[in-house]
Image (cartoon, grey):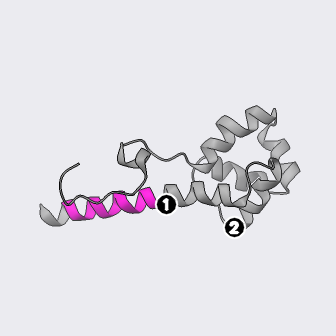
Amino acid sequence: MPKGQATTGDALSDAGIPPLPPGVFLAENLLPALKLTLEEASGRTGMPIATMLKIVRQKKAVTVGCANKLAELHKDFDSHFWLGLQATVDGAAAVASAEKSSHRSVA
């Protein structure tokens, strides 16, 4: 890494591996493991299907309320887990935006 370049402090991000969005984890990992459809997960959590679809499509961030509802799907994935995934995604986006801004101002 070039001297003076900021790091996120996260080894995966620093290695160029993008963070795992909560919706991707939900759709590709958790729901198949639980053998649930998105509709069934919606019913189990009480979260509207439209909200779940937006999260899966990465059009909506996981809020505290969403995290609390998603935590009902599996005891190992509590609200802190969901908020942590979202915070990692948001942090990576902020770093990328700052880097893009700094490159524009240099050019």
Assess whether mark 1 and mark 2 are in contact (beta carbons under 8 angstroms): no
Q: Earlier in the sequence, mark 2 or mark 1?
A: 2
Separation of residues labelled 2 and 1 (CA atoms): 14 Å
State yes or no: residue 94 in magenta: yes
Residue located 60% across and 42% down the image? 24
State yes or no: residue 9 in magenta: no
User: Which stretch appears magenta?
Assistant: 91-103
User: Which quadrant, please, contains the C terminus?
Assistant: bottom left
User: What secondary structure is the magenta-colored segment mainly?
Assistant: helix
Seen in the picture, residue 64 relative to 35 is either above or below; the reply is: below
Residue pointed to by mark 2: 64
Q: Nearer the viewer, residue 98 or 17?
A: 17
Q: Position of residue 84 (x, y in %)?
A: 59, 58
Q: Position of residue 66 (x, y in %)?
A: 72, 61
Disc 2 residue crowd, few under 14, some 14–19, many 20+, Cα 10 Å:
few
Q: Is any atom of residue 80 visible in this view? A: yes
Q: Position of residue 52 (x, y in %)?
A: 71, 51
Q: Amino acid at mark 2?
A: Val
- In the image, taking residue 12 as reference, residue 45 lies left or right, namely right
Residue pointed to by mark 1: 90
